[in-house]
Image: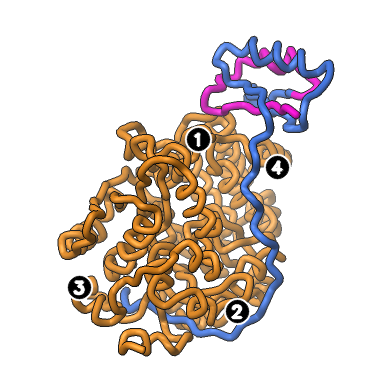
Chain colours: A orange, B blue
Amino acid sequence: VSAAASRHEDPHAPRLLAGLRADRAIPLREHVARLGPLRRVDLIEELEQSGLRGRGGAGFPTAQKLRSVAGRRGRSIVVVNGTEAEPVSGKDKLLLRHAPHLVLDGAVAAATALGGREVIVAVGDRALPERAAVERAVAERDDGRITLRVAGVPPSFVAGEETALVSHLNGRSPKPTFKPPLPFERGVRGAPTLVQNAETLAHVGLIARFGAEWFRAVGTPDEPGTVLLTVSGAVRRPGVYEVELGVPLVDLVSEAGGVTEQPQAFLLGGYFGSWVVAGRAERLVLSAAGLKEVGASLGAGAIVVLPSSACGVAESARVARYLAGESAGQCGPCVHGLEAVAGALEQLAAGGRKQVRLQLVRFLEQVRGRGACRHPDGTARFVSSALTAFAGEAELHLRGRCSGHGPHVLPVPAR
Amino acid sequence: MKSLRVNPIACEGHGLCAELLPERITLDDWGYPIVDPEPVSGDLESHARRAVAACPTLALLLGTAAAARPAAAAGRPVHARGRVERANEA
């Protein structure tokens, strides 16, 4: 066992975040000294055994995604999805800034397994430090016949959806397209294309070295491994945390320094996720199976703790307005539906009439599954969960009152 | 078995489909079609074809139901012990 591998014998040691320092990206030499070189393995088989699922939000089995690309004719292309436009998520940007080689290793291992020679790292146009770190890392590496390049992506919320990303890389607007075809069928320049989230590829970079069994040593049998979670809101130390799948949410909160004031609800899964009231959330474990019982999921791993001083209705209305504005503007039910949803929630927050709530429920029922992508579904999920979690607060608003008195908690980027 | 689907990007909400095939297509609050994905067969299929042909933007599609990606295996909750690790940055 090499020195590098022996350091990975403790399965509970941090994986993706090991050796990270805030002031720099891990340089290539140090990266290789710590982890050893990439090994030649039957990557798809290893991924299959590992049980790794995508960490970008959809949770699709990674091996299956590679297999679908491998089954197509033509030289495939690997796209690293590092766009992470979700305002409350920072984990992919953190990896790109501080551990770019780990992400690139995963991409190169995938390209090698697929017989591809091209890796494109897609980074948000406004993510300047991330782009600089990745460009430096690319310049440091020699991946033989595989070439790597960095591509900037406009900072819209939907630009990271995989067909939108492919459309942008093909010189068209960064908007989702009708499916089929999916990128594995016809992607960048028509080639079979693997679009994979940055964190997912970082896990791939480790599985390619240490194997499926090592990966499965932590987490749950059904959801093995670790996951990066971005924690914000009413915690003492907001930031990105690596947790083993299946750990209690309360453990994560205490690791984040504990709460700064009494929490009233948790937003699980970011702006396409769900609000869960604190009493219920505090009993949950962090895994798809654990969150399913309250209708939530980890999504792309963003968790916000809403303090009691905030108004959940007003906070949700601001986010709903943001999400409505982030519609690609292509599908009628999304354009008009999300506008109607945001408008109704704003009216509710402003103490509108009782019928507004019924109207809002009616709008929500009409937007799910009605777009070319899941933007309307994600928005509807977020707003529906707000109506449930903040039902009491909504009642107060109907009577012209609001219990919120603190500053805004959820960030909404300016357009 | 064939079923109807709408391309929501191409659809401009003309609404002809809902007039020609009210058995399967209704309009939402904004005039866009809500399509029942149940397979169409027998008599209904010819009406469905007419609706497809009538769409001014060719947004209504009649085809074999696309093979869905295999659903994720249902997981049972397993409570594992574990550590959390924080990134060393602000």
Determine which residue is flagged by label 3: A27
Q: CA distance from mark 4 to mark 1?
A: 33 Å
Q: Nearer the viewer, mark 4 or mark 1?
A: 1
Quarter containing the N terminus of chain A: bottom left
Q: Amino acid at mark 4?
A: Val
Task: Say whether mark 2 and mark 3 are on the same chain.
Answer: yes
Determine which residue is flagged by label 2: A248
Residue A123 lies, with reference to residue A282, above or below; the image says above
Badge 1 crowding class, 10 Å Cα cut-off, few under 14, some 14 to 19, many 20 or more, is: few
Q: Amino acid at mark 2?
A: Pro
Determine which residue is flagged by label 1: A181
Q: Secondary structure at mark 2?
A: loop
Q: Secondary structure at mark 3?
A: loop
Q: CA distance from mark 1 to mark 3?
A: 38 Å
Q: CA distance from mark 3 to mark 2?
A: 34 Å
A364 left or right of A114 in image: right
Q: CA distance from mark 2 to mark 1?
A: 39 Å
Q: Secondary structure at mark 4?
A: helix
Determine which residue is flagged by label 4: A361
Nearest the viewer among A415 and A190 is: A190
The chain ID associated with circle 1 is A
Q: Which residues are magenta?
A: B1-24
The chain ID associated with circle 3 is A
The chain ID associated with circle 4 is A
**Residue A72 located within the stretch drawn in magenta:** no
Nearest the viewer among A312 and A90 is: A90
Q: Nearer the viewer, mark 2 or mark 4?
A: 2
Q: CA distance from mark 2 to mark 4?
A: 32 Å
A313 left or right of B27 in image: left
